[in-house]
Image (tube, rainbow, N blue to C red):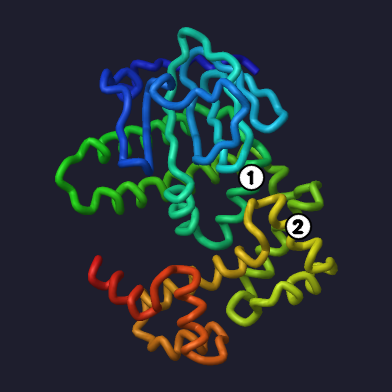
């Protein structure tokens, strides 16, 4: 493949002398890779990292695989993966975005349920892609918007605004990865196939079925095998995915409808309101009533 020649000057953000912008400890976006950890030694990453190379190149390892990152390439590394930066050329230029695991998880939790799981698999299966020029322009626009929003002072909704743009950026990235990796739609890896089948069944059944045995039966595997496969592919156990879907729906119903908590408990097939309340508080730290009140007050 012919190396892409990129006119860096058409992206002013890349040459901004300020180098980086922060959102506390949740998010950093920078045009100077030396301002963030370089990971010269193999390290288990605790953050979500994505970056775009515009000039020069770098050699990295993700897991046991070596990648040469060249202009026009997009890279994604998820929390829990082993990463090492071997070499960075002196003329390297690009944009780098890094989020805490908690913050990136917050973004992922807002993705449509049917998208969140495939997004994780797609980006873990293929960490690096060459983008077309229009795709590169699209991603660079998001970097520029995020930079601008991080530069805004005295905006009490700054965090929420950033989350909205990051969520849209994630959708764009997922769309690009899917276009460049059609094999994602016809996976040969049995574990990944099981994972996607599981999330598909879960998406249809989570309101009525929270027992792991049910999903294992549907997939003709043992509960132990299913749990191990789901953990290996996604980093979450099958039980955690079930809870994720249920809590996501509960939050949606609490905020977006006027249904009583008793009605919501019934819709999600909890035996009674008390059991639903204990379940919700166990996973969120607050009661359904408190969650609804907090969200109403914040809106």
Q: Which residue is label 2 attached to? A: 228
When the figure is inspected, residue 186 is found, relative to residue 60, above or below; the finding is below
Q: Are marks 1 and 2 in contact (CB under 8 Å)?
A: no
Q: Nearer the viewer, residue 36 or 152?
A: 36
Q: Which residue is mark 1?
A: 122
Along the line of sight, the residue nearer the viewer: 283 or 142: 283
Q: Quadrant of residue 95?
A: top left
Q: Residue at 61%, 55% (x, y): give it.
A: 117
Position of residue 22 in the picture relative to residue 155 (left or right): right
Give the foreground label among 1 and 2.
2
Q: Secondary structure at mark 2?
A: helix
Nearest the viewer among 146 and 175 is 146
Residue drawn at (28%, 21%), measured in percent from left and top? 16
In this picture, residue 236 sits left or right of residue 38: right
Left or right? Give the position of 146 relative to 50: left
* Circle on res. 218: none
- Mark 2 Cα shell of 10 Å, populated few (<14), some (14-19), many (≥20): some
Does label 1 or label 2 sit earlier along the sequence?
1
Query: Do we see residue 82 in this rendering?
Result: yes
Q: Residue at x 58, y 61 (%)?
A: 114
Q: In x, y percent, where is residue 294?
A: 29, 71
Separation of residues labelled 1 and 2 (CA atoms) = 19 Å
Q: Position of residue 101 (x, y in %)?
A: 48, 46
Q: Farthest residue in the top direction?
A: 90
């Amino acid at each position: 493949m012919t190396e892409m020649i990129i006119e860096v000057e058409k992206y002013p953000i890349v040459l901004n002398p300020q180098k980086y912008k922060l959102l506390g400890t949740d998010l950093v976006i920078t045009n100077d890779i030396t301002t963030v950890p370089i990971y010269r030694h193999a390290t288990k990453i605790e953050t979500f990292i994505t970056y775009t190379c515009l000039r020069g190149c770098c050699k990295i390892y993700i897991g046991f695989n070596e990648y040469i990152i060249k202009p026009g390439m997009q890279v994604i590394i998820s929390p829990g993966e082993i990463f090492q930066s071997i070499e960075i050329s002196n003329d390297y230029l690009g944009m780098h975005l890094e989020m805490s695991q908690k913050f990136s998880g917050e973004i992922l939790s807002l993705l449509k349920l049917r998208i969140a799981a495939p997004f994780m698999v797609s980006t873990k299966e293929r960490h690096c892609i060459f983008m077309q020029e229009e795709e590169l322009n699209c991603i660079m626009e998001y970097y520029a918007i995020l930079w601008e929003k991080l530069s805004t002072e005295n905006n009490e909704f700054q965090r929420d605004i950033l989350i909205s743009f990051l969520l849209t950026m994630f959708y764009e990235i997922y769309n690009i990865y899917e276009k460049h990796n059609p094999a994602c739609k016809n996976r040969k890896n049995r574990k990944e196939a099981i994972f996607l089948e599981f999330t598909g069944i879960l998406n249809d059944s989570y309101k009525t079925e929270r027992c792991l045995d049910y999903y294992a039966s549907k997939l003709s595997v043992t509960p132990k095998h299913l749990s191990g496969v789901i953990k290996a592919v996604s980093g979450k156990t099958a039980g955690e995915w079930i809870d994720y879907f249920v809590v996501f729906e509960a939050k949606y119903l609490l905020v977006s409808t006027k249904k009583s908590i008793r009605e919501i408990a019934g819709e999600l097939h909890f035996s009674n309101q008390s059991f639903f309340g204990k379940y919700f508080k166990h996973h969120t730290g607050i009661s359904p009533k408190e969650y609804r009140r907090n969200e109403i007050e914040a809106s």
